[in-house]
Image (cartoon, rainbow, N blue to C red):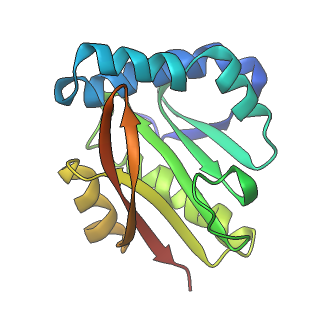
């Protein structure tokens, strides 16, 4: 296997981003949600106009992670007003890290988190934060044990007609 590479996305990548978003989200969360709630969420969160607007937002950045010439996951980062919670100008949000199931447990999540931390430090941010579903134990363990994030709050996340809880986790940068 080759060393993974990161590739910044632009609006021209919207169709590939949509395909990756639909696949990774469905494969990660479908078993824990009803089909109707999953489809309602996918239709609202990953439609082409919404993704295009996200790609055009100057306060958001997207990166594909590429292994052996194939897109195997992606990262979405937000600063300023693009953040899903008002965390101020010194924070960077990791809104999405999704990796295709066949490529999980290969260190790719760590590559993506390191990219987020590196970009936050280069932009003189003091914190990196993210939300993780309260029942996503592997992700919670990854962020806490491997990267030093800790929970500081929570917020609601609506999946169709199901109100769920995301734990908000933060890492203070040195």
Residue 30 seen anywhere in this rendered image of the structure: yes
Q: Residue at x 33, y 62 (%)?
A: 143
Which x, y percent locates residue 38? 33, 20
Q: Residue at x 74, y 70 (%)?
A: 89
Q: Residue at x 70, y 18 (%)?
A: 49
The total number of labels drawn is: 0
Q: Quadrant of the C terminus?
A: bottom right
Residue 69 seen anywhere in this rendered image of the structure: no
Which x, y percent locates residue 154? 37, 62
Which x, y percent locates residue 11? 77, 24
Residue 142: quadrant of the picture: bottom left
23 in relation to 103, above or below:
above
Q: Residue at x 72, y 23 (%)?
A: 52
Q: Quadrant of the N terminus?
A: top left
Which residue is at the far front?
161
Question: From the viewer's perspective, is 161 left or right of 75?
Answer: left
Front residue of 137/64: it is 137
Front residue of 79/66: it is 79
Which residue is at the far bottom?
174
107 in relation to 32, above or below:
below
Which x, y percent locates residue 53? 75, 29
């Amino acid at each position: 296997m080759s060393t993974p590479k990161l590739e910044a996305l632009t609006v021209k990548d919207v169709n590939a981003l949509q395909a990756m978003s639909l696949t990774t989200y469905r494969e990660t969360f479908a078993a824990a949600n009803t089909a109707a709630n999953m489809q309602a969420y996918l239709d609202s969160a990953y439609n082409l106009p919404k993704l295009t607007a996200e790609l055009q937002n100057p306060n958001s950045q997207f990166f594909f992670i590429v292994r052996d010439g194939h897109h195997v996951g992606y990262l979405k980062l937000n600063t300023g007003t693009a953040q899903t919670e008002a965390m101020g100008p010194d924070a960077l949000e990791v809104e999405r890290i999704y990796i295709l199931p066949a490529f999980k447990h290969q260190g790719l999540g760590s590559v993506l988190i390191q990219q987020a931390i590196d970009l936050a430090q280069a932009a003189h941010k003091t914190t990196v934060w993210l939300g993780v579903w309260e029942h996503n134990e592997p992700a919670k363990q990854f962020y806490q044990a491997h990267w030093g994030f800790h929970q500081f709050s929570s917020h609601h996340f609506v999946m169709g007609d199901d109100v769920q809880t995301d734990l908000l986790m933060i890492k203070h940068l040195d």
